[in-house]
Amino acid sequence: MNLPEDLRYTKEHEWIKKESDNKVRIGITDFAQDELGDIVFVELPEEGDTVEADDSFGSVESVKTVSELYAPVKGTIVEINEELEDSPELVNESPYEQAWMIVVELEDASEWDNLLTAEEYKAIIEED
Amino acid sequence: MAKNEFPLIFERSKKERTSYSLPDLDVPDIDLDAEFETPYVRKTAPELPEVSELEIMRHYTGLSNRNYGVDSGFYPLGSCTMKYNPKINEDVARLPGFTHIHPYQDPKTVQGALEMMYDLQTSLKEITGMHEVSLQSAAGAQGEWAALMMIRAFHEANGEHHRTKVIVPDSAHGTNPASAAVAGFDAITVKSNEDGLVDIEDLKRVVDENTAALMLTNPNTLGLFEKEIMEMAEIVHGVGGKLYYDGANLNAIMGYTRPGDMGFDAVHLNLHKTFTGPHGGGGPGSGPIGVSEELAPFLPKPLIVKENDEYKLEHDRPQSIGRIKAYYGNFGINLRAYTYIRTMGAEGLKKVSEYAVLNANYMMRRLEQIYDLPYKQHCMHEFVLSGKKQKKLGVRTLDIAKRLLDFNYHPPTIYFPLIVEEGMMIEPTETESKETLDGFIDAMINIAKEAEEDPEIVQEAPHHTIVKRMDETTAARKPILRYTREDNS
């Protein structure tokens, strides 16, 4: 299972990458894409939308199910990955690189410290 | 054309081949363009297929032979209650007194049809323990929506416009949160506990003075009876919310308990499931709704009422949410359900639920020896297995479902409910014999063995069907939604 050490994770299977002190990039993990199977549609919010931590910010649809995407942090969406609209398969092919989903400007930069490390996330998925 | 491809009727067409000779024109021929000043007069022929009568027969008989239904084999599609549809229902539905009438007729001339609807309302009231029933909703999802609109109208009539939350368990049918959203509510999830039942503590956490209703299926989608239903009703009623019963799983409880006695304020029923309306292939379904006395004024109108031995359509219902379907619902399906209820009688319907539950438990106890069973307690009319043991061998639940086709079984519902990993939801219904159940169980055992010894045969299934594994991913990512004709002349 591919779990880059420099990322943070959530129990809802999102990864979070620090872009600068108050900006993070968010996507779903390799484990999540494998569980979902072939992704056929990604629904993302608009740039400028605000999200609360633990709220749904979009959804991913695979051949077998539709799954909500949960915001790991509170803030404003400053960028979305428009490429996923036409190429949802990137989520399967490159979950940590090409298939990033949104960039969020944090309201509270210390939220980063509450997120799971690769090791902590690994323990959660292995428990299942 | 490849050997196994079945041509469309358009592809069988040959120019000027006909099945029927129209009589000579016996009215004056007119020039449409001269008569109608409109751009809508078509300029080209409608390109209807041109085939002989024999070709039509072969085409549709061929298609019907490729169909798979409960009349051709076992169909344990969980939550859908694919039971046998007794053919006496069809006899009754074809009686001229029912087929030769029209909804626009004066009610005085269709008293028999109205009596049937009135009696069906009465039977459904008794079965569900509700105060009043409307037969109007076309199927389950419309029944859900209509009931939620009534609950909304009730709260608004009381000036409680702040009730915007509808609570839905994480194991619920997907239609529940969808209906809540369409009815203008926010769907809020309540979690299941480790026994697969609603987590009472979580329910207490999400319920508050903004709660409009709790939607619940009982037994739930895991096939488990929500034993704490009385406490749940107390919690929701305690803050002024209403309880809505999704009747998808009523087949498990008839004659044993009733939604009305469990504290529900509104229910919908699926007459095409529990009450043997033909199911699948577009139905149609029928999703009557039943309500408590408090909600009755809000029922869709008209309602069928009886006054001094005369049956009438009551339109004067000022608080009604209005008409929700043309005429009075799917009359033909309601008639089949009425026939079924009259055929079975009260004791018979109780036995239906008894045998449905017995069949499911028999299958579950044999299959749990091979497949993972996440919730171990006795089930009601259906149960959910997990394919996680087989997943470790590289065989997914989807593969198992496809392999079942090779054994000539319809697969169970898969990947639902969402809280079970690699879920397989199996509902045998009461109409199947022990031999049929054993045959299916043996096929499942066989497939589990193949997953260990020869996984490829499962991963590449089906092998014996006319169409092999479909490319569902490409179909979803790049759907072709329109047929384009090749010139076949």
Image (cartoon, grey):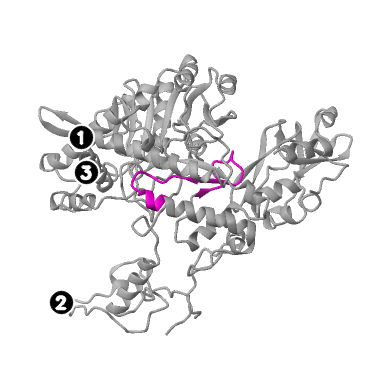
Residue drawn at x 25%, y 33% is B347
Q: Amino acid at mark 3?
A: Thr
Is residue B470 depicted above or below A68 in this figure? below
Q: Answer yes or no: are tags 3 and 1 on the same subunit.
A: yes
For marks 1 and 2, give the CA distance: 48 Å
Disc 3 or 1, which lies upstream in sequence? Answer: 1
Q: Which residue is mark 2?
A: B26
Q: Answer yes or no: are tags 3 and 2 on the same subunit.
A: yes
10 Å neighbourhood of mark 3: few (<14), some, or many (≥20)? many
Q: Is residue B243 magenta?
A: no
Q: Give the percent coordinates (x, y) of residue B378.
A: 47, 33
Q: Quadrant of the C terminus of chain B?
A: bottom left
Is residue B387 depicted above or below B115 in this figure? below
* Highlighted range, magenta: B413-437
Q: Amino acid at mark 1?
A: Tyr
Q: Which residue is mark 1?
A: B118
Query: Disc 1 is attached to a residue of which chain?
Result: B
Identify the secondary structure beneath mark 3.
helix
Taking the image as shown, residue A78 lies to the left or right of residue B155, namely right
Mark whose residue sits in front, 3 or 1: 3
Q: Give the percent coordinates (x, y) of residue B29.
A: 22, 77
Taking the image as shown, residue B450 lies to the left or right of residue B105, namely right
Identify the secondary structure beneath mark 1.
helix
User: Which mark is drawn over residue B349?
Assistant: none
